[in-house]
Amino acid sequence: MAKEIKKCKLETEKDIISSMPEDITNRILGRLPIRDIINTSTLSREWRYKWRSMPDLIFDNDSFHSSNKRKRPSKMTIYLRKILRFLSLHRGNIRRFEFSSRWKVISSKVDMFLDHLSFNFVGVQHLKLTFTTMYLIPPFVFRFDKLTALNLNSCKIILPASFNGFKNLKALYLRIITFANDNALETLINLCPLLEILDVRTLLDCRQRLILHAPNLKSLTLIGSLSYLEFKKTQMVTQAALAFDSSQIYDLTNVLRSLSNVDYLVFWNFEDNESAFKKINFTPSMMKNIKFNKLKKLFLGVNLDCSKQTSFACCVLENCPSINYFRIHCDHLKIQNGISLSTPNMFWKDKTKISSSFDNLKIFDVVNLHGSKSELKFIEYIFAITPSLEVSNIEIDWEKIVYGERVMCDIAIELLSFKKASGANVIIEKP
């Protein structure tokens, strides 16, 4: 009797495993490394070929077993050969394909499995390729017309003349990218009419103009140098992060007005040359008709020892009536013998009265402070116009700025002595 009960229990458990819905099986397999997925073929007869129909494939250097005695080039050759073998045995649709390598790849081998993938699995929706050295994207990658998400890292792109766009693409991520043709970035983006997420970081050439037509765009990240920037039809953007070389040419008014509906904004000037920012056409009067009424979180990276950049920061801030979190990263010029090379800030001599009050600001964070008079004046100004402020976290860059112990103490005392419109806690990072 006991043996029959045990046998019945085993059969029941076997039925549960073998009769699981396919999407549940694929979800389980999708959480395993490729080498473990292949090993599931030994579980039972029913599981023998399940790995061959997985829709989501993620390959990295640890996907297959490899002897530690092998040299790196040999490991790479085997790794790439096994990917091609895996794809040749695969049956069914592939929805997601990801490839990454910690080592320098053999381009011809990567081309082979991408060619096989594009020819036999045209329904790929998510494609992610990550390299450690620049890889030239082959033209057949642009056959994936069903793509909804494309992520490329460390790649050189040559757009084929026959490329008509990714008509279904909703998310585009580009990291450490160079284009062979001028303005190819603009062409690529504007041929993706459904694009909702655009994240471009570290463009390696400044020959790329970007006149952005993206009526469905909701999230925008642009970090790098462009020859020209202009926004058209970007009214749907709600989150934006922009970090520019301020020597580039762009219409600042156009950029800010196009982002007036955002609730999250990062704006960063990563050029450490004050004269470069002066090339940007900006005056406070330009901001009169630009309001960020929905903005809740604001992150600015500016040099507060530069009058123009300080004016820019104050103008943006004063047009954010609903802001509840404000973080500023203090950029500054190089230091020589403990002396900042930034020029004195004349802005505060004209700022004779407080022009705004921020009833919703709860948190004010300052990063990379080096204790200049202009920086301290800006902090004092914010403290005076924020009646609801709860906490201010201040990180001082003690390492890069050569101060004596007494000067460091004076800076901390001055920060804590500022008059505040609220009872906010001021937290200074210990040196």
Image (cartoon, grey):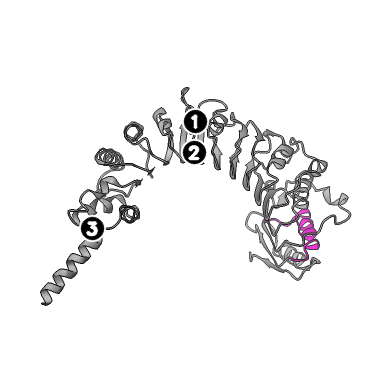
Residue at x 55%, y 42% (from the top left corner): 196
Q: Percent x, y for residue 323?
A: 71, 57
Q: Nearer the viewer, residue 319 or 63?
A: 319
Q: Bounds of the magenta span?
A: 368-388
On screen, residue 16 above or below 228: below
Residue matched to label 1: 165
Q: Earlier in the sequence, mark 3 or mark 1?
A: 3
Q: Where on the picture, by quarter, is residue 216?
A: top right
* Residue 169's disc number: 2
Q: Nearer the viewer, residue 233 or 320?
A: 233
Element marked by disc 1 = loop
| Circles 3 and 2 in contact, beta carbons < 8 Å | no
Rendered-image quadrant of the N terminus: bottom left
| Circles 1 and 2 in contact, beta carbons < 8 Å | yes
Q: Amino acid at mark 1?
A: Gly
In the picture, measured across the screen, residue 324 lies left or right of residue 209, that is right
Q: Is residue 373 magenta?
A: yes
Q: Is residue 277 visible?
A: yes
Q: Amino acid at mark 2?
A: Leu
* Residue 18's disc number: 3
Number of other residues with Cα within 10 Å of mark 1, as a class: few under 14, some 14 to 19, many 20 or more: some
On screen, residue 169 above or below 345: above
> Could you give the CA–CA distance between mark 3 and mark 1, rounded to whole angstroms?
42 Å
Element marked by disc 3 = helix
